Amino acid sequence: MTNPNPQELNSLLLVKKLIEGDAVNVTQITDPILQDIAQRIAERRNGKTALTVFDSEIAKLPKKQGKAIRVGVLTARPKINDWQDRLNESLDAIPDHRVQAQLRASLIKQLQEQADPNADRFFPPIKLIDSVDTFTKQFPDPVWAVPGIIPIGITGLGGRPKIGKSWLMMQIAQSVATGGIVLGQKVERGRVLYLALEDSERRLQKRQKFQRWEDVSRESIKFILADTFRDQIGYLDAGGTAKLLNHIEKEKYRLVIIDTLSRAFKGDFNDNNEMTRAMSPLQERLNALEIACIIVHHHAKPKGMNPDPVDDLMGGSAIAGVIDNVIGLYKEQGKAGAKLSFRGRDVEEQKLQLSFDKTLYCWQNEGDADEFKVTEERQKILDFLTEQGEAQVKSIAEACDMNKGSAHYRLGEMEKAGKVTKRKSGQNVFYDLADRPQRPQLT
């Protein structure tokens, strides 16, 4: 096999020098394919492109030139590998693992797009956890902003407009800031960040005065209003998540409230990919920092007879997929009180009966909603029978605002408990108080 002619040899040597880091006049390279290789190397050095794949270019050359490239030029590739090793060491030295992972992912993606065989050099070792270690590990007690109600991570609070969601958020914020009691739970004191994106300072002040915030100290609660959020943070799906997380981590808040999601998110709530891209970094980082976040959102119009805190959220499945827990606030029109329904990874599924205290302008926990309903319905029946005397199921149901089936079931429970008696008269059945004095028999 013949050796390369002087011009070809000179071109090969110039490419070799370029790979090794020397300054080279690319116009002196006469071979067009070698010129293309040299240009790519120069662009890579200037940061315009990813690493060059040499083997695919070598295949385009005549056999003798390809051999010369492999012998003369590719001997310089260990220098590139040295550079890769140094870059790997630099990445390992970055203390912020999020930044390290993002840089690695970006570099690997570029290398894979160029089909570079060295892409896998930048993959960090996969961290494996042995099942025995997880089984035997002793974990500290879970962290709660409000024990049993608001854990760390993201909790979504949903409800129809104007039913008291913001009053509840202000109440929780005050309790965390002062180390007080909320919904019957004593909470640990900590700083609060409240993104009041639907309120003005005047409205916030009005609620603060109604709820008697005199004991809230300076620096314990910070508000961000809509104009500041738009100008200095930005929508969560348009780069705002990183800025918000940076502020949260820097200021070491215990609780973050975003009121509401519709004012913090610009895109489509029903788009799973869009929600995941925007919310996953927030959810993951808050869990890592052991910070609780409540995101207030709206319920869609009721879909059925049985409320569901997940399904009732606008964009339900897309939002529920990227938050840890969901709470639904439900209030029947024209009736006092409300129900708080829980569903999530870290909270027990439960329903609380709430009543609104118009003296302190806050919600009070009356206990388990189902038990409260039973007690309330039983009391209505007892009150009706006390006043009206013996009555049939239909009359009792109408007077107590119950359907006939529920009234019949509740009367059966009360009969077994010895609270009421049942008397049959032909085809009719009558109920009365068990402890009512018997009427004297006429003789």
Image (cartoon, rainbow, N blue to C red):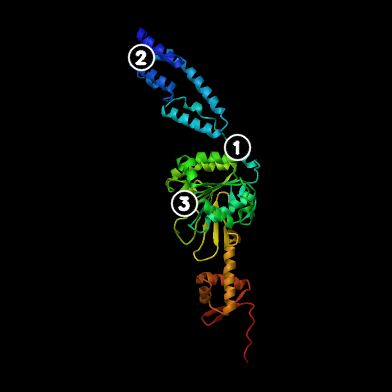
| Mark 2 and mark 1 residues within 8 Å of each other at the beta carbon | no
Give me the residue at 53% from left, 55% from top.
165
Instruction: Please give the label number shown on residue 27.
Output: 2
Does the rendering let one see residue 146? no
Kind of residue sitting beneath label 3: Gly
Q: Residue furthest bottom?
A: 443
Q: Position of residue 421 (x, y in %)?
A: 60, 77
- Dot 2 or dot 1, earlier in sequence: 2
Does the rendering let one see residue 115? yes
Kind of residue sitting beneath label 2: Thr
The quadrant the N terminus occupies is top left
Give me the residue at 54% from left, 65% from top.
336
- Dot 2 or dot 3, earlier in sequence: 2
438 vs 279: above or below: below
Q: What separation in Å lies between label 2 and label 3 (alpha carbons)? A: 62 Å
Tell which of 24 and 348 is nearer to you: 24
Give me the residue at 64% from left, 48% from top.
189
- Dot 1 or dot 3, earlier in sequence: 1
Kind of residue sitting beneath label 1: Asp
The quadrant the C terminus occupies is bottom right
Where is mark 1, residue-wise? Answer: 130
Q: What separation in Å lies between label 1 and label 3 (alpha carbons)? A: 35 Å
Q: Could you say whether the residue bearing mark 3 is in a helix, strand or loop?
A: helix
Q: Could you say whether the residue bearing mark 1 is in a helix, strand or loop?
A: loop
**Marks 2 and 3: which is nearer the front?**
2
Are there few (<14), some (14-19), or many (20+) residues within 10 Å of tag 2? few
374 vs 71: above or below: below
**Marks 2 and 1: which is nearer the front?**
2
Where is mark 3, residue-wise? Answer: 316
102 vs 374: above or below: above
